[in-house]
Image: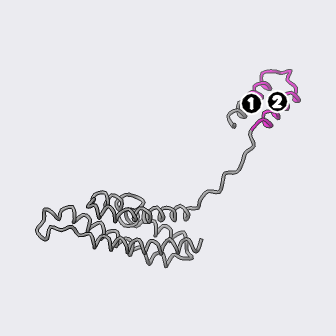
Amino acid sequence: GQPAMAAALLATAALAATSPLASRRAVLATASSALLSAPVLRPFPALASPADDLLADLKTVRKSLDRVPALIDAAEWDQARTVLKTPPAANLWNLGPSKNTIRNLAALRPDVDVELLDRVEDVAGALQLCDQYLYDNVFVYFQPGSGKANTKDPKNQLKLAARKLDEVIELASGGS
């Protein structure tokens, strides 16, 4: 590869510098054989754009949300919250505006920025409420009240977040 080519070129330069009898022809022959033996450089495959990377993150979040209802049904509150509080999902509601994937995507997509920004708070609010309901369920058995875990409200908030996220993904996919 490139290290072998560099070594051959250095050897050629050393030959030229140490041997006053080395003809230009010998030096050029050595250099050209080093260049001809070098591998052909191929262009890198097209890299995904930043907008494509953000869209991929949103699709990953959307898939991860599908796991949460089963965790809720199993009363696995901490595992369900972990899905919501770990990036890339946490970027949508818990790590501040500069990390928000939808906001960052909107900044890169002026063709749909208003529509995307309209959904930022919907997604963030639904995920935050879902997390709050799950958090409350951790302590439901130790607090005054019915002693029953609330599974309906976090699932409803999860459905809302998923629906709004589907809209974001559709908007971002349709215009790219």
Q: Nearer the viewer, residue 29 or 71?
A: 71
Quarter of the picture containing the C terminus is bottom right
Disc with the residue nearer the chain's start (1 vs 2)? 1
Q: Is 33 colored magenta in this rendering?
A: yes
Name the image quarter holding residue 69: bottom left
Q: Residues within 10 Å of mark 2 (few under 14, many from 20)?
A: some
Residue 89 position within the rendered picture, expressed as x and y whole percent measured from the top left: 40, 62
Q: Nearer the viewer, residue 5 or 20?
A: 5
Q: Tell me the CA gap for discs 1 and 2.
A: 8 Å
Q: Residues within 10 Å of mark 1 (few under 14, many from 20)?
A: many
Question: Which residue is identified by label 1?
Answer: 8
Magenta stretch, overall SS: helix
Residue 62 position within the rendered picture, expressed as x and y whole percent measured from the top left: 44, 66
Image position of 91 (left or right of 130): right
Residue 149 position within the rendered picture, expressed as x and y whole percent measured from the top left: 21, 67
Residue under the image location 18 percent in, 68 percent down: 148
Q: Which residues are magenta?
A: 9-38
Residue under the image location 53 percent in, 61 percent down: 53
Q: Nearer the viewer, residue 145 or 16?
A: 145
Quarter of the picture containing the N terminus is top right
Image position of 6 (left or right of 59): right
User: How many discs mark residues in the rendered view?
Assistant: 2
Image position of 24 (left or right of 63): right
- For residue 30, the mark is 2
Q: Does the residue at mark 1 contact the one at mark 2 (Cβ under 8 Å)?
A: yes
Amino acid residing under circle 2: Thr
| Residue 7 against residue 41 in the figure, above or below | above
- For residue 38, the mark is none
Q: Is 175 colored magenta in this rendering?
A: no
Residue 68 position within the rendered picture, expressed as x and y whole percent measured from the top left: 35, 63
Amino acid residing under circle 1: Ala
